[in-house]
Image (cartoon, rainbow, N blue to C red):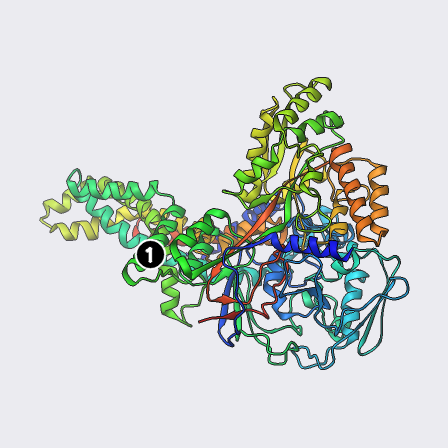
Amino acid sequence: MYQYIAKRVLLTIPTLLGAAALVFILMRLIPGDICLVRLGGGGGSFDPKALIACHAEIGVDRPFIVQFAEFIWGLVRFDFGTSMWSGKPVSAEILARLPISLEIALLGTAVAISIAIPLGTISALKQNTWIDVVVRVFAIGGIATPSFWLGIMSVLMVLDVSAWATGTPWMPPIEYVPIWQDPIRNLSMAILPAITVGYRYAAVSMRMTRSAMLEVMREDYIRTARSKGLVNKIIVNRHALKNALLPVVTLLGIEFAFLIGGLVVTEQVFNLNGVGRLFVLAVQNQDYTLTQALVMLTVVIFVFTNLVVDLLYGWLDPRIHFA
Amino acid sequence: MGAWFLRTGLAAMLAVGLVSAPRAETPKRGGILTYMIPADGGPSLDGHKETTYAVLHATAPFYSVLIRVNPDNPASTSDFVCDLCTEMPKPTDNGLTYTFKIRTGVKFHDGTPLTAHDVAASWRRIVFPPAGVSSARQNNFVMVDKIEDPDDTTFIIKLKFDTLSFLPALADPYAYIYSKAILDKDQHWYESHIMGSGPFKFVRYDIGQSIEGERNPDYYHPGQPYLDGFKAIFAPKESVRLDAIRSDRAALEFRSMPPAARDQLVSALGDKIVVQQSDWNCGNVLTPNNAKPPFDDVRVRKALFLAIDQWHGAEALSKIAVVHTVGGIVFPGSPFAATKKELEKLPGYWPDIEKARAEARRLLKESGHEGLTFEMLNRNVSQPYGIVGTWLVDEFSKVGMHVTQRVLPTGPWLAAMRQGDFSVALEANCQNVVNPIADSGRYLPHDLYPENFAYHKDPVQVEIYNKMLHETDPIKARALMRDFENQTIGVGAHQLMVTWWYRIVPMRSYVKGWKISPSHYLNQDLANIWLDK
């Protein structure tokens, strides 16, 4: 298995190089200029000499090939340079935002798993009953409802309910505090966004669990297990669910990787200073170095998550061997 | 002349409307003010280098400046007072030399004394930046010849020519006074660090999230600051800011909120909220590309302006957008601004809109462009670009023009204008201290003012501007400003100011001492704010 892991890690190198070249070229194809956004975005006057000085300072006045070589050489050394916008190291910019994104992704995934797998299983086992209908409506609601709308509505609901109950409107904190510093404040900030993203995530996973379970429950080995006289609980938990989870795990992996950098709107709605918001800011400001680093981070997260999912396959289905 | 300025100064103050006018009360000491900055965090922390309010709202409380707009009378466009100097100087040498006496006993937050040498080092960095240092407002100081600091308490600025634009430029709120010792070691240190002599000492900065300051006990303005500290939270999403004020997670944001947000807060919080409002030294500018057919024809440009009913439009738009007042190229509260009667002579301001539109149709027919179709470039910012842009499209349709909008994010929008890749653009002019002469420089041709995207050539306009820049009599300068305005909008029809913006600041009623100004860049050091709770 170690050989397999080493092979997979080596295979990420061309993926990373391809992504690096792509993001480098695409960012430079977007019309505009970070120095212009910085100096002229507010609509005020600025000195044209400041624009030239800005270009020289961040190095965008050099030939593309020099900039690309510097970017790749930096990647090799895990040095992503400094943000063209803030002048701070890119690693500091990302590390400041990663904990909140990671926390929401983990909590959202926990919410999704705790809803999706039991409800998806029950829905499959109670196919075409009222329970199945209710669960499917709940799932379709989750898919159809945009997370940002759900987020705004949930904050408004908290505000209105608290105002009605206590006379003073209350909303969750709008600043992140690490969980080890103040767990209550941290969780009161994180819980609503986790439920908001977890609901949509759960809805998708629930439908996948249901359809996978329905398929597995019709397999010959399930019929054999029943004919052996095994109780339903053992059939479902030991024989059916484990096999049905293969596509669900794949989906959970992809969604988890997406949550780390893709919670753009949810992060804005709850004022979470996360990686998704940073991503949008970097693209808007045309901050090449920061965008490049964020794309590379996303690629690494996806590659790593896929590797973990592949390894989980082996645990879930012993017939799968890693060569 | 004095009486004239007094009258016009009063008019400027009346331009600031307070829904709840602050009463004179005895300030209370203590408390932490939490406010929001409607941005995702600024770029660097260096005020000399940056132009966004996100930097200013986060860092101004840490710094002193040489002179400033009077914090107790920020609505005035001509009331400048000392911050670090002891007395506003009377210029000598035929108005060419300004000698400032610097306060003694002022300390930087690291305990080192602040002297005239620090003031001079900071101003040299702004006016004559060393190689590798960018100074965003360097072009406001074309009149400065020399900066001298003969001793610890004397700071002298010598001018090449006397001009009315000098003092307002000197009151630049970004002109922080930095430590000479630090600048001598590293000119870029202040991009990522904070160390000033202002009312608050730096505590912490969580990148993109918040910044905190604590009271500076050694502050040189007696009794100030009143607050124990402050926390500024970055919150780009309007709904978050609105909810945060409603739930008292934050007391206010200093930039502005749209009318709907104001009304929502007033309705939800009643007397727990007060609103300060003012005409804003920002406005939208309609810029036809004077070098691109058919807008290279002055008749087409005039027709474009004549189609717009600003007088009725501004009133209707003010209910849904942060716009309010019709004005020319000068901030409406300034003594240099055109009166309504003066404006009504210019295309785009005619009082009889039917007559104006008939003239627009005639000009289009005469130039062979009846039913003109074009695309208007706009920025993807709703307040107020999106709303004003949509209104303009409708206005143009009333003279038979067919207009669509190309709405782009800030970067590509600026790039399209710089490349001349547009027919008509909706842009903005947003300045800090009201400095009519310097501010109107942005209407000069592209070869003189590279950020003017009308791409016009107009030697007459340039000649008038140069006369105005060197004129030291305010009455004559105002007359020249009318000529310049007439040349820009009337004769050349190069660009048109479309509705000035309106600043709306709802705040928790326990926030006292702060007075709104015509610019969200001014009066932001928080020294005079106190909390009544």
What chain does badge 1 belong to? A
Residue lying at 45% horizontally and 54% vertically, measured from the top left: B242
Viewer-proximal residue among B389 and B212: B389
Name the spot of residue A208 as percent of width and height, x first: 30, 43
As drawn, which residue projects farthest toward the left? A229
Viewer-proximal residue among A25 and B36: B36
Question: Based on the displayed image, in which of its 4 quarters is residue B313 positioned?
Answer: top right
As drawn, which residue projects farthest toward the right? B93
Name the spot of residue A163 as percent of width and height, x first: 32, 59
Q: Quadrant of the N terminus of chain A?
A: bottom left
Q: Amino acid at mark 1?
A: Val
Q: Is residue B335 left or right of residue B500?
A: right
Viewer-proximal residue among B397 and A206: B397
Q: Which residue is mark 1?
A: A158
Q: Is residue B450 left or right of residue B194?
A: right
Viewer-proximal residue among A49 and A142: A49
Q: Is residue B445 visible?
A: no
Residue lying at 78% horizontally and 32% vertically, measured from the top left: B491
Name the spot of residue B360 as percent of width and height, x first: 67, 24
Identify the element where label 1 is drawn.
helix
Q: Is residue B41 left or right of residue A232?
A: right
Q: Is residue A2 left or right of residue B346?
A: left
Q: Is residue B244 above or below residue B493?
A: below
